[in-house]
Every structure is written in structure tokens, then in C-alpha cells.
Amino acid sequence: MIRPLILRSTAEARRELERIGVDPAGIARMLPKLEPLPILVPGLRPAAANILKQELLSLGGDAAVARGTVACSIDRTDVLLIGTRKQLSGLCAKLAQQPFGLAALAEQVRQLLATLATPRPTWRLARRELPLQRPLIMGILNVTPDSFSDGGRFSTVETAVAHALQMVEQGADIIDIGAESTRPGAPLVAPDEELRRLLPVLEALAGRIAVPISIDTWKAPVAEAALKAGAEIINDISGLTFDPALAQVAANHRAGLVLMHTRGTPATMQQDTGYQDLLGEIADFLQASLQAALTAGCSPEQLVLDPGIGFGKDTTGNLEILRRLPELASLGCPLLVGSSRKRFIGTVLEREKPEDRLFGTAATVALAVAHGARILRVHDVQAMRDVVDMTHSIISPTID
């Protein structure tokens, strides 16, 4: 019987064409025709939008524009380009000699297509590179008295070290240590106090675990001291907006740097969770964070992006991020998702206690992996290692 095919990647499309027995040269020609890819272009003048629409129509695609664009009765319009990779590549060639900045737009589209076709294979840290072919588990170690999920459980050096060793044994690829709670409403912690909690644990773990250590901080002095004590990654919830000097610290140490989207500080972030265009605003924020890191001297290979689930978003927004996560791949960096035990899961499932949100967390982690996340920040390492590996096996052409 006839049936539709769900081809989620170039690898899946290639495998199906090979199964049919298509000639290798034919496979190369066919692959771009099997990948429809809508691309949103914001804020064009109507004259430019009309050219885009006509050129894409001539190639068999289309473009959605605002009412009034054809008559040029509006000032600006967003344009949704609708076509396959082959049609979009042809559009770029047609725009090379066009006015209204369309030649520059064509180059942006070319770069986007290239970025989506070749995701980055590794993450460069201070002293090593981590392969990203298999999604990584980042185990959460809170050495704070007031974390939303496990505050106080690992606030002594002995309990913190024991938990880190346990997470490594359970399959963690990275240990992420936080010495300041970033739960909604949490007060700020002075750098000296953050280091007082953090450094003894770092020193105690030195030489005892083989996986890299990440520091969940936005403060440049804390990051500097932690990197000197053996950490290899900075996990910044503010995307360099709280302390811009943090970018220079990462550049100087060649440390891995996670740039997260947030709105406001932890004390205020849940007071404003409305967005006109959630994914668009997240993408613009992260693009600015990326540029700040690159300007400071970081290399692109050091950088990972996090959409900031639970930070300045309500339940609807968090669910939307998970559904539309692939849109952020256009930024060209691996994606980290941290949904573990968060309040929106409790809201959907009516689970008040964070520790009762294991299965809800598993659903969000599986979907995040299916939608392209390469690093998953979790509390329950053993369970989520299974979820990640099983999901990866389902969506990958072969088992690693």
C-alpha cells in the first residue's frame, strides 16, 4: 500500500533512497528535493518581499507575506519562504544581482543552509574536546542550601563529592556545580560566599573524576577561580548580560561556555513571562550573547546555547520551546536543555513535589533529544541516561 514517509534528517532520506536502489549520483540530486524548509525573514520592505515571492514561485516554491505587500501599502512585512533546500539554493542564485539588500540576504540564507546541513561535531573545553554525536548528560550538583529541588542535600563537601562520584558512575558526561540558587525568587549570593561553597568541592574532586566539571555561575571572579581550580566549563544563566567580563574569562581560559536566555534576574524573572514572538526573541537574545562572546575572543567551538526553560517563561512558553527547539539550530551552536523537575512539569501533571516529576522530565528530555538537543542538564542521571540513549537510538540511522 502507498504511505507517507517520515524523513526527519538527511541521513534518513539517504537511507531510504539507498534502500530503493537509487544511483549514487541520483541520491545527490534527490536529497535537496526531499527537505522542505520554511525560513522566516523578518522586516523586509514590500518591494524586496515581492521580488522574493516572485522568484521563489518561479522555482516551484512560495512565500507568505502580509496583506498590503503587493500594493506596497504597508511599511514592512515578515516573509515566510516556503521551499525545499534545492529551491532555496536556487533562490540564492537568483538574488545575487537583485537590489534592496537581497544579495546580502541570499548570503545569509546560504550560510543558514550550510549550518543546518553540518551540525558541529564537538564541544571544545579548557582541556579537551567532547564529541557530540551522542547526546551528553550534564549531572546537576547543587551545593546550595536553597535549591528548588534538592536544597541542602549536598551542601557539605563529603555529600557533594559522593553525589558527584555517583552521577559519574551512573553515566554523567559532565558535572555541573552550582553554589548559588537560580530558582524563581532566589536572592543574590556574594562572590565570596559562592566561592566558599564551591572551591572545597572542586578541590576535593580534583583527580577523582575523569569527566569535565562545569560551574553554574554568572560572575567573572567566581568563574576565574573555579577554572584555575580545575573546572572546564562556565554555565552562565544570563547569556553574558549580568557580568559582561565573564566572556573575557572564558576566552582567556579557552573554557566551554554555555549562554542561556533569561529575562530579568532570578528574583524578578517570573514577573514578566509574556512574549510577542517567544522563539524569535530567544534567538535574538542568544545571537547577541554569541556576538559578545566572539568579540571577547571566544571561538565558536567553545559555545553552547540554552533557551532557558523556566527562566522568564510560563508553562505555555516552556512547552512551546520544546516543540519548536529545532528553530534555534540556525544559530549554529549545540543546544543544551535543562527541563529537569521544573515547575511547568508539575503544573501540567499536577505534581507539587519536584522529586515526583521524574516521568514528566523523561518526556521532556526525550523530546528535546528528538528535536536536536546535544546536552541534557538533569538531576536523575541514571534514569535520564537511559532516556537519552534510547531516544538517540530511535532517531539515529545506526546505534553508536
Image (spheres, helix red, strand yellow):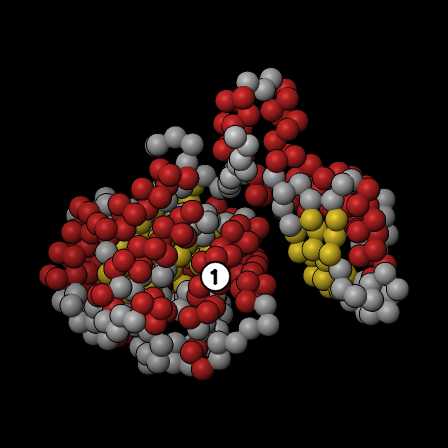
Residue at 26% across / 45% down in the picture? 386
How far across and down, in percent of the image, does residue 193 sit? 26, 74
How far across and down, in percent of the image, does residue 335 sit? 45, 52
Residue at 19% across / 60% down in the picture? 201
Q: Is residue 204 left or right of residue 101?
A: left
Position above or below: 13 against 148: above
Whether residue 288 is visible to the viewer of this picture, yes or no, is no
How many numbered circles does the render carry? 1
Quarter residue 343 falls in: bottom left
Quarter residue 74 falls in: bottom right
> SS at mark 1?
helix
How far across and down, in percent of the image, does residue 240 sit? 48, 66
Quadrant that contains the C terminus: top left
Whether residue 71 is visible to the viewer of this picture, yes or no, is yes
Residue at 23% across / 56% down in the picture? 380
Give the residue furthest to the left.
158
Residue marked by disc 1: 321
Residue at 69% across / 44% down in the picture? 83
How far across and down, in percent of the image, does residue 88 sit? 71, 42
At label 1, which amino acid type do we have?
Ile
Q: Is residue 363 left or right of residue 71?
A: left
Q: Is residue 52 left or right of residue 388?
A: right
Residue neighbourhood size for the residue with mark 1, other residues' Cα within 10 Å, grouped as few (<14), some (14–19), many (≥20):
many
Position above or below: 308 against 212: below
